[in-house]
Image (cartoon, rainbow, N blue to C red):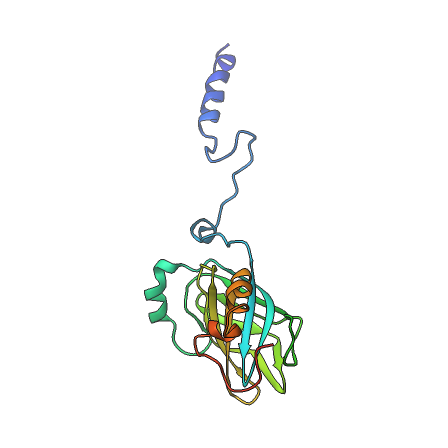
Amino acid sequence: MKASASLPLLFVLFAGCTDASKAPTGLAQPDVPAFVKEENPPPPPVDVAVVVCTSGCAVFDGTYMSNGDALALTTAVAAAQGDGTCVYPGHASLKIDKQLEPVVVAAATSSNAQIKCRDQRASGNGTIEIGAVAVDLDNVLVFNNPPDCTAQCGNFTATDDDGGVVNGFIFEREYYEEVCENSEGGPYVCIPEGRPEGPPIG
């Protein structure tokens, strides 16, 4: 009789020692890495026009995405030193595709042409060819990767195969078509450095 009377007590003790972190089904809840909890989720990609200028300029179709932290910009600029840096912390990517119409200057991109940011370090893949100049996206100097993309969405500098500096400007696609393409001065009015020497934008 004493043995049978102790069974309810043993059951209560066992139930009290079960792991409270487990779900009602008895399965443990998966741990969520800290970086997943804290990092801003990436926004959806934005269709952009990418103006790349050497001696002349060509315009390419592209997609841009950034979850950069605008509030951390001051600290980021101080930390971003040397070649291959990004202005904003966080992740960003720029995919550069085919040349947009109208085509004025011969230009092409490799299928893997893109620039990425992670931990304020810029990296790239592929090439862009404008006329006789080849731009190596492995050699990104600076990538300005703001989280907002409503007009100009940032810019980048890279080097060509002769070591010259090449500038790229990223515009939200509808803004480029409505403001830059249809302006009296043509697309060059949207480029901060103004019109470079050489053929017109294609």
Classify residue 72 as left or right of residue 122: left
Classify residue 181 as left or right of residue 110: left
Above or below for 10 versus 181: above
Q: Nearer the viewer, residue 21 or 143?
A: 143
Q: Residue at x 60, y 83 (%)?
A: 134
Please state, as top left, top right, bottom left or bottom right, where the C terminus lies in the image: bottom right
**The quarter of the displayed image where residue 98 is located:** bottom right
| Residue 66 in picture, x, y percent from top left | 49, 60
Q: Residue at x 48, y 25 (%)?
A: 15
Q: In the displayed image of the protein, which residue is found farthest to the top? A: 1
Number of numbered discs on residues: 0
| Residue 101 in picture, x, y percent from top left | 65, 70
**The quarter of the displayed image where residue 61 is located:** bottom right
Q: Residue at x 49, y 16 (%)?
A: 8
Q: Nearer the viewer, residue 152 or 33?
A: 152
Above or below for 67 versus 17: below
Q: In the displayed image of the protein, which residue is found farthest to the bottom? A: 162
| Residue 142 in picture, x, y percent from top left | 45, 75
Classify residue 65 as left or right of residue 61: left
| Residue 155 in picture, x, y percent from top left | 47, 71
Q: Nearer the viewer, residue 18 or 45?
A: 45
Q: Nearer the viewer, residue 129 or 138?
A: 129
